[in-house]
Image (cartoon, rainbow, N blue to C red):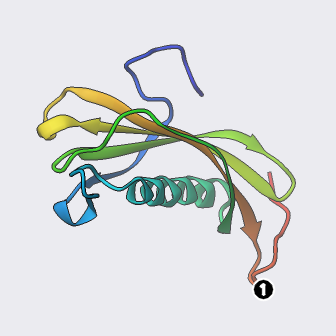
Amino acid sequence: MPTDAKNEPHGSLTIRTLAMPADTNPAGDIFGGWVMSQLDIAGSIAAVEKVKGRVATVAVEAMTFIAPVKIGDVLCVYCYIKHIGNTSISIGIEAWVRRNRFNDRVKVTEGTFIYVALGDDGKKCRIER
């Protein structure tokens, strides 16, 4: 669950990856779309673990880019459960970077992604609790 700590991530570390030159925009920063896809991947991992089955992204309720991601940053994505409904689950997600692979941690993005649970037939299904 979230806390009020300003310099500590909320949730569990779900993925960690390295920002590479191929993912940059003309200004030399990492594309926001690349960052968003990393958040979606992490959120889906967290959702699958919680619902113990398939999920599909249905919405990005909120997303804020706080600071740019630079080449060589280690992007660390943390997830926590915000809400579980009958067929959907909301995942709070934060992305932090370690600049130059050192311990100076910077929060770069946060958002809420919503996933729907899917049955074997690919249709939405009830989340068992």
Note whether 2 is above or below 91 in the view shown: above
Percent of width and height locating residue 96: 35, 36
* Residue 72 visible in the shown view: yes
User: Residue, x 75% and y 41% (percent of image)?
Assistant: 83
The picture quadrant where one finds residue 86 is bottom right
User: Residue, x 46% and y 60% (percent of image)?
Assistant: 37
Secondary structure under tag 1 reads: loop
Q: Is residue 85 left or right of residue 69?
A: right
Q: What amino acid does circle 1 point to?
A: Asp
User: Residue, x 77% and y 76% (percent of image)?
Assistant: 119
Q: Is residue 31 left or right of residue 94?
A: left
Percent of width and height locating residue 46: 56, 53
Front-most of 31 and 94?
A: 31
Q: Is residue 109 left or right of residue 56?
A: left
- Which image quarter is the N terminus in? top right
Note whether 112 is above or below 87 in the view shown: above
User: Residue, x 82% and y 71% (percent of image)?
Assistant: 124
Give the residue furthest to the bottom.
121
Q: Is residue 8 left or right of residue 102?
A: right
Percent of width and height locating residue 11: 50, 34
Percent of width and height locating residue 121: 78, 85
Q: Disc 1 marks which residue?
A: 121
The total number of labels drawn is: 1
* Residue 93 visible in the shown view: no
- Check disc 1: other Cα within 10 Å, few if <14, some if 14-19, many if 20+: few
The picture quadrant where one finds residue 62 is top right
